Every structure is written in structure tokens, then in C-alpha cells.
Amino acid sequence: MRALLALLLWTALLFSASRLKPLSAFALVWAFGLGWFAPGLAWTSESMIAHGHVPVSLAYAGVALLGLICGFFPALAAGLASRFTEGPARAILAASLIGLLEWVRGSGLVDFGWLTPAYALLDTPWAGFAPVFGAEGVGIGFLLTAGLVAAGLGWLFSFGHKHSVRGAASFAAALLTVLAGWGLTVVPWYEPASPVPYRMIQANQPVADLFTRVDPVSRIEEVRALLRGVEPVRPGVPVLTPEGVLPTAWDRLPEAAREAWVGLLAEAAAPVLHTNFRPTPAGWANSAFWQTPDGGLVINDKRKLVPFGEYVPAGFRWFTDLLGIPMADLAEGAADQPNPEWAGRTYGLLICYENLDGTVLRDLAAARVPDVFLITSNLGWFGPAVQGQHLDMTRMRALEAARPILSVNMNGMSAAVDASGRVLAALPTGTTGVLQGTVPGAAGAPTPYLRWGILPILILTVLTAGIALVLGRPRR
């Protein structure tokens, strides 16, 4: 139902914009963009207020400003479509350009990737595009469907045999897009493999920020107590801990905390995944550590940093200075970092919002597709409202890679997701506990998305835009 309402909304928008002059189309879609993007950014105000101690008025003003900046991209697409074409074909061109400019926006200019409509389409036919084109393909497939329906309606309301034929063809193309997505959902993108056992510890500990001091020893002991309470003891089964258990870099921890952590590793009798900050030649990095009982250690520095959380996007330092947010840029991890191995399996490590971007999956799968991906996160910075959204992102990544994903979160919705994007088990929000079991394994060749990324869908979208330009070329 949510996807159907979104389709109706976008169809109405594209239909209305296609009947307006360029400036009016730009203004309409910009206003729509503010209403579309600002709610998706609203939870960042909690981070600014609770952890940055920014005044409430400034925090909400910041959300509105970011919404206007994000809304500029689809508005520009609608204005360009109205400028260079006429008639119902404008809706198809606008949908194509919105998809392309959203990719440009999310590729680093204003990188808020969670704002894509793709995550609202997980249980719809458009989700079938994920293993082939990634989340970008899911969103573009949806936008093109709305644009084709809007164009079909425009031609339907026109007169003449030529317009009737174009209207019917546009509706047929929209239907074929939906059917193509549905058909791809039943394609077997992986081969069954042996189950993957796991233990996830949801510690539900408070955020350690600049204004909140915590006791690292008690945090570690809480995790040890949860681990001891797991029955039966399962030696050799990896233990996944959430981001943020260790509140500061290893060499800055008191000796008692380091001893407690060494004790936790001994009690686990298995690999332990955890995070911490560490100095690198490029600066401080947010890193995932995979420590094994035999003394082995694999470190992955976070590749995909969160804008306005872990770095300030180029040209926006004035924004953080205006709001008075205490922030330092972290170092970005290299793309080609090693994947840990254990008991014949390869694991891909992601930290927090690295599940936002499928390009990280492609980096991890460059040499060999991991048998299972692991995500360790702490969403306490953003509040419980984002936990379901974070899990939706994890489901999308599972579809793109056709591999299971185990996601452990500090404060809720730690979950096991299979290779088809289904949530098999999850812990409730705001609770402490241990989630353990197995997730069905998956093997086989890399998905088309892991092989080629989003280049195919960008080419198809450009071709669609070209067709719309021809159909809507202005009369002399």
C-alpha cells in the first residue's frame, strides 16, 4: 500500500509538472522535494540537539536548509525537461533526469543515500531490479514507471490517433517495467550453501559522546555477562558485538578495561567482531576488528563515512560552523582491504551506515564474494526511529549481493537477513539480549550488480531520456 501511494503521488507530480512552463515546473518540484526530503532528514535534528547541543531552532532550520538543497536536484530535472521538450513526453524525461540527478546527488555532492525511494519498495516488484541494477535501479525503475503512467495520462487526455497510440504504448511500457521487476524476483541469484552460525550481542548501552562520560570497564563487563548467559556454550561460533562498546581508542583505555576485553576474547573461544577508533597515516579511522582465538587480527577501516557525522562534505564547513557542531573529519578506509576468514568462510565487514551504499559491497566482493556480510552499528546517535530504516538498507544490500547479512546494533533490531532479503530473526528496539542461531548460506557467481554496478541502469536511463527528447521535441 505504501508503494502504491508513493506511485500515485509521483505520477500526479510528474503529470502536473509536465503541463507547466520551466520555472513553474521547477518551483512545484522544489516545493515537493522539500516535503519529500525534509522528513527523511528530520531524525538528524536529534543528533544535533542531543549530541551536538545545537539549539532546537537552529537544528530544524538546518534540516529545512538541507531539504531545500536536496530538493534542488529533482527540481532542476523537472525544469530542464520542461525547457527542452513539450507535451506528455516531459514526464518521461523528467523521471529519467530525476533518476540521473539523484545518482549525482547521492554520489558525494549531498550524500544522503537513505532518501532514495528504493527502501520503500523492498516488498514490491521493483525490488527485483536490485540484484541487477542495485538500489539505484530500483528507484529509477519506480520513477520511470510513474513517468510513463503520467505521460500515458497526458496523451490519453489529448486528441488524435497519434496521441492514443503513444498513450497506449506508454501504459504498456509502464506495465512491462513492473512485470520485468517482478520476473527478476523469482530468478535464483544464488545457490544454497551450508548454514552460517552466529551470536549477536545487543548491549543497549548509552552513546559515549563529547558530553557524556562512560566507564569502559562496566561496558565491557556487561557484554561479558551477556556472553556468559548464552546456553549452550558454542565454541567456534563468531561473536558479533555492536559499534561503540569500546568508547575510546585502545591505547587510551585504562589497564582494567584492556584486561576485561582480553578476558572477553578468551571466554568467546571464537572470533569476536568489534569496533574502535585507531590512528592511521591519513588520520583517525573508525575501524572494525576481527580477532580470533589463535591471535589472528584483521582490521577494516570504514570506507563509507557519514556526511555531517564523520566528515563535512566539501563546501559545507560553514554549515557546521554556523550550527556550532563539534566535529572532526575521519580518515576514509581504502577500497581494497582484506576480508577475514574463519572455518572455511569469508566474511565481509561493514560499519554502521556502510550498509547505505552498495559500492562498499562491490569493494568487499572485488576478489571473491564473501559468504556472509556482517554489519556492526550504533544507531543511538540518531534515535530508535531510524532502526527500521537501517534494517531496510541491510535487506537491500542482501538483495544486491544475494548473500546473507548479519547485522548487530547497539540499541535494537539486531537481525539475521537471508540472501533473499528476508528478516529471519531480530531483537526488539531498546532491549538487551543475545541473538543466536543460523542463517541459510548462499554461494554462486556474483550478481550482475556486483559485476557491473550501476553502469547498465545509467545507460538505459540515458537512452530513455533520449527517446523522451525525440518524442517531445518542440514544434517549429
Image (cartoon, rainbow, N blue to C red):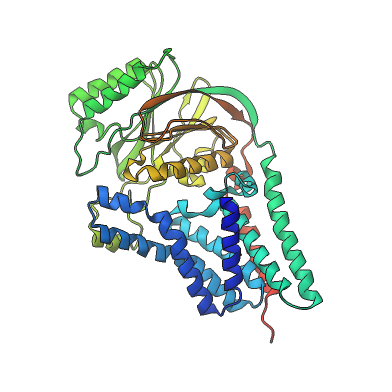
Report the front residue among 77 and 337: 77
Quadrant showing the C terminus: bottom right
Residue 331 drawn at (x, y percent): 33, 46
Residue 186 visible in this rendered orientation of the protein = yes
| 416 versus 238 height, above or below | below
Image location (x, y in percent) of residue 233: 41, 13
Direction top: furthest residue:
232
Q: What residue sits 40% from the left and 40% below the top? A: 352
Residue at the spot x=24%, y=51% of the render?
52
**Number of numbered tags placed on the structure image:** 0
Q: Is residue 236 left or right of residue 379?
A: right
Name which residue lies at 70% across and 67% down: 152
Expressed as whole percent of the image width and height from the top left, the position of residue 257 reads: 22, 25
Q: Residue at 37% across / 49% down in the picture? A: 306
Q: Position of residue 89 (x, y in %)?
A: 66, 71
Location of residue 94 (image quadrant)? bottom right
